[in-house]
Amino acid sequence: MKDFKNVHLIKNPLIEHKLTIMRMKETSEKDFRENLEEISMLMTCEVAKNFDTREIEIETPIKKCTAKILDEKNFVIVPILRAGLGMSVGVLKMLPKASVGHIGLYRDEKTFKPVEYYSKMPPNLPQKILIVTDPMLATGGSCVAALEMLKEKGAKKIFLMNLLAAPIGIETVATAHPDVEIYTTAIDEGLNERAYIVPGLGDAGDRIFGTL
Ligand code: PRP
Ligand code: URA
């Protein structure tokens, strides 16, 4: 796969361990959701290396000092429904004052093209830092469509968090949106004839919500 400046593959033994549990077909829905949430928290730490802090005056039990904070309200977490919800829970735990926008997309089973069915965003998107979540980057169609939709609404600074990606999905999104920083924890072999990631972990939405 070509190297893209805006693609970041997070390498971390703890994330690899949790992802292995998620891949296993015998993993329960509860364990699947919990590991996804925990990995999302760890991924947020990586993405957060890009964020600017500002200094405030505080007083510890020992003395006054300056200390750094993030303006949490500047952040908008955007899960792509449904499976993105499973990641947004972890991101929101790390940035509890962020607002949350939702984009509803599903992949048509025959064409694999994304179909939009819902969108609700908080105001002032051009001034916000967006963190878009979707665990699966397969053909890339869903993420490309979601990012286009957000840019049409004025979004300027966007980070994309995908648990798992196929090379074609990464290439498609990285090429279509070179200004979006893409974070993933694994790039798998490819796609099967149903456009599922191989070896992947199956249908993320179904495994999160028990709709298998
Ligand atoms: C899955 C997944 C992504 C999309 C990835 O959603 O959560 O949104 O497929 O595929 P792509 O990169 O080829 O577009 P799905 O359509 O299964 O909907 P769901 O999350 O509601 O189950
Ligand atoms: N959507 C999923 O949930 N899994 C895949 O492997 C591809 C798309």
Image (cartoon, helix red, strand yellow):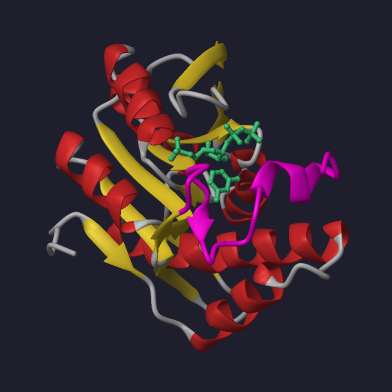
Instruction: Decide if residue 63 is in sight here.
Output: yes
Question: How many numbered discs sit on the rendered protein?
Answer: 0
What residue do we see at 46% from left, 52% from top?
Answer: 162
Residue furthest bottom as drawn: 13
Please give left or right for residue 169 compared with residue 202 in the image: left
In the picture shown, does residue 174 fall above or below 66?
A: above
Residue 138 or residue 160, whichever sits in front: 138
Instruction: Decide if residue 52 is in sight here.
Output: no
In the picture shown, does residue 24 fall above or below 40?
A: below
Residue 79 x/y as whole percent: 56, 35
Asked if the magenta segment contains residue 205, the reply would be yes
Asked if the magenta segment contains residue 28, the reply would be no
Residue 121 x/y as whole percent: 51, 17
What residue do we see at 66% from left, 33% from top?
Answer: 82
Residue 103 or residue 192, whichever sits in front: 192
Residue 22 x/y as whole percent: 69, 68
What residue do we see at 66% from left, 40% from top?
Answer: 85
Please give left or right for residue 134 compared with residue 205 in the image: left
**Screen quadrant of the N terminus:** bottom left
Q: Which residues, given as a range, are shown in magenta?
A: 192-212
**Screen quadrant of the C terminus:** top right
Residue furthest front as drawn: 193
Residue 108 x/y as whole percent: 54, 22
